Image (cartoon, helix red, strand yellow):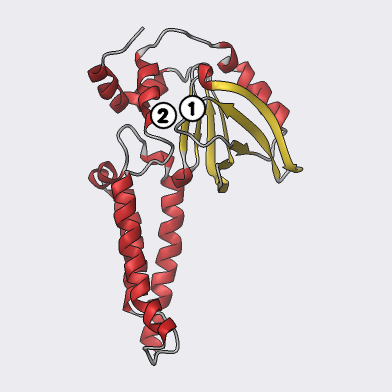
Amino acid sequence: MHTQPSKTLASIKYLPQILAQTMNEKFTLTGGARIGMANATFPFANLLVTKDVLKINASLIGNLVFQPQDIISIEPYTRIPVIGQGIKINHRIEKYKSKVIFWTTKDPHFVLSEIKRVGFLDNINSKISLADAAIIQRQEQGAFPIKMPVAIIAVAIWSILFLSDFLPFLLGNTTARTPIGIGVKTATGLLFATSVLALLSGGFRKLILKEGREFNDIKKFVIFIMLISGIMFLSLAIISFVR
């Protein structure tokens, strides 16, 4: 059964509402995640499972959504007991990294039993519904939640600002004792301001997030970045004032 392209594109806007409608019985867990080579430590990843959806939110390293038919298998995974254990998700989504692990301090077999309890592994549906179309469209966008042009521009600006201080220092073209100058201070302040805007402005969030993505997917990471960059910016300002 095929879905009209216009309906598919429109449906992704309502993915949060569609997902909410399927959450009558759910299993949620806070932990960490490994997606490809990137790793998010506790508590920067969340697992949510219903009979129709398995969702991993790992802030900026990836937001993954699976349907039952996307899954090959889910198995216990242990690298280090307690602090390095979880579940490994083997899947068929080409746009996602093949290695997907959700880290948890709970017994991986308990997590698997809860996933089975909510009916996710039993809910194989061959028909494409509105919810299926929205999830498929989101999967096609890949796991990274930020619009790629926005990410590229941000990295370019911050890199230029940092290099404007570090490059002359490394080349010996400055008498400063440290490479921390106006470039580093501006980059740190810009990072703090960006985090605050993301927290306070719905319009800014719409500008930076991909269609259908929720700010809650990256909220913990944004708060963490705001705190770290704020402390760094304040420290740099105090050091400059003392000098």
Q: In the drawing, what numbered circle is on residue 93?
A: 1
- Occupied quadrant, residue 172: bottom left
Residue 214 percent location from the top left of the image:
36, 36
SS for tag 2? helix
Q: Is residue 206 left or right of residue 30?
A: left
Q: Amino acid at mark 1?
A: Ile
- Residue in the image at 26% along x and 41% along y: 206
Q: Which quadrant is home to the N terminus? A: top left
- Dot 2 or dot 1: first in sequence order is 1
The quadrant of the picture occupied by the C terminus is bottom left
Nearer the viewer's eye, disc 2 or disc 1? 1
**Residue at x 35%, y 44% (from the top left corner):** 146
Is 5 on the left-hand or right-hand side of 159? Answer: left
Query: What's the mark number on residue 139?
Result: 2
User: Left or right: where does residue 90 sit relative to residue 148?
Assistant: right
Crowding at label 2, few (<14), some or many (≥20) Cα neighbours within 10 Å?
Answer: some
Q: Residue at x 27, y 24 (%)?
A: 9
Within 10 angstroms of label 1, few (less than 14), some, or many (20 or more) residues?
some
Counting from the top left corner in percent of width and height, residue 231 is at 44, 68
The kind of residue tagged 2 is Gln
State if disc 1 and disc 2 touch (CB < 8 Å).
yes
